[in-house]
Image (tube, helix red, strand yellow):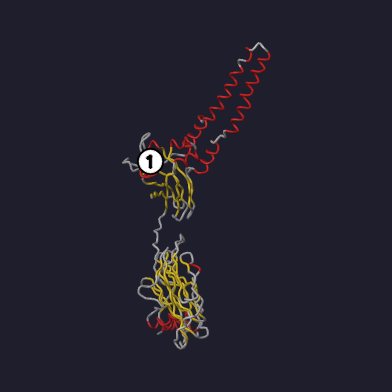
Amino acid sequence: MASLFQFARRILAAGASPPTAACWLALAAAGLLAPAASAQTEPHIEFVPPTVKIEPGKKVTVRAVVTGADGVPVSDVVVQWRVADKKNEDFVSLGQTVNQPTRNEVTIFGLSAAPGVTPPKLVPVVVSSGSLSNVLVVEYKAKESAEVKIAYDGPADPAPAVAPGGRTTLKVKVTDDAGKELPDAAVAWELPENVKDFAALGPVDDKRPHEVTLYGLSSGKVPRPLSIPVVARFGNASTLIDVSYTAALEPVVPVQIIWDVLPQHIVSDNFGRSIKKEFYCIEVTIRNNTGGDLQVAGLAFDLNKGEQGLVPVTSYPVVQGVLAKRKLAHPRTMALSGISAFGQLLTGFNPFFHNINHAKNFSVGIDIISNPLAKGLESVWKDPVPDEANRLDQQALRDDRIIASNQILKTRVFFPKDALFEHNADGRDEVPSVRQRLGKLVLVGYKILRSEAVTFSR
């Protein structure tokens, strides 16, 4: 008895109202809540916000924080929520429950009571995690008694569910205070904002206002909800339909790598024929989920050819050197150099003309070759190498690239063709064959915050 008295004094000292303190004291006496002698030195569950007030038509999100004996919040725990007295579920309904490594919360919805039912002033919600438990007391502020009652009018087994790309039909029944059904009541349907990326309500038919279609949507947002709370309202009455969301959860991996081989004509258009002839161009997308900045030390392929060890991709300076050679041996460079050399060669024959008129005509011919012809060819035949070099500089992966935490790097790497296929071998320039031979792309990098070497593969 003394411990319960001290427990009540601590509750009042913490700022709780007398009705709230009385409810907590009753729960402790019933054994639903153990009054710890010192909440600061024993594991316990706290709430943010510590007190909750709700009324019909409103909602509030409450977070549970599990704290250890050292006072430090504990992560990676599962928290369960339930309304202590089931009859109070007509007034307070628990919506989506979130259990994430560092976030455990639930959305609480206030509902309207049926006619003639006395609403509670306090609604206890039992919260547990393993052997720990606590009670969140929700202060319920009732509005004027609803003149009608609205309730879910669908099968309880199986419970309503929706998946991305699917749909389900939800129905409610509206009755007056005498229990008579109101088939023409214009029901309003609502979805909370935090789930609108995962589900959407279809249009309501005026002839069937008690029905609505819920569509499941695909979304890349995380965390994904476990359920979709749909609220139906008419007048002061409301009800909550909790629809299971059955999307498969993707496992979170430290580093995600997606890659594919670009077709040869795209490589030629972007980087020229020399790069197309000597290398495969692989488009790579890397997402850093390690929790810190990631320094990329290198990329390599684990080939499906039976060789032992990894084969690194070609470094940027080597690919740049091949492109530099292309500039020297390009047909345009050779043609302009030939015209210039031919003009200089003809100039050496000019002294052999003893006839002045013939010498002048010959000089004019040389000038036409060396100037208008060469400059006209330069204008018509543009040099593609500078643009190819700029694209290579912008798109190719450099050494020691840093990917910030939770960021994505899109880049391109190159792999020598002769390291994968013999010259003129079947499948040398076919994307499916190349993709199969390349096998797995492996990233070697360093997580900067910890200076640890890590290796990931797709």
Task: Note whether residue 53 is visible.
Answer: no
Tell me how many marks there are: 1
Residue 340 spot, x, y in % from top left: 58, 24
* Residue 369, picture quadrant: top right
- Pick the residue in front: 17 or 239: 239
- In the image, what residue type sits under mark 1? Val
Secondary structure beneath label 1: strand
Viewport quadrant of the N terminus: bottom left
Q: In the displayed structure, would residue 379 be above or below residue 137?
A: above
Q: In the displayed structure, would residue 234 be above or below residue 288?
A: below
Q: What is the residue that sits farthest to the front in this orientation?
A: 207
At horizontal 48% and vertical 76% (from top left) the residue drawn is: 207
Residue 158 spot, x, y in % from top left: 35, 73
Q: How crowded is mark 1: few (under 14 residues within 10 Å), some or many (20 or more)?
A: some
At horizontal 64% and vertical 13% (from top left) the residue drawn is: 351
Q: What residue is pinned by disc 1?
A: 311
- Pick the residue in front: 263 or 1: 263
Task: Note whether residue 360 is visible.
Answer: yes
Residue 163 spot, x, y in % from top left: 41, 65
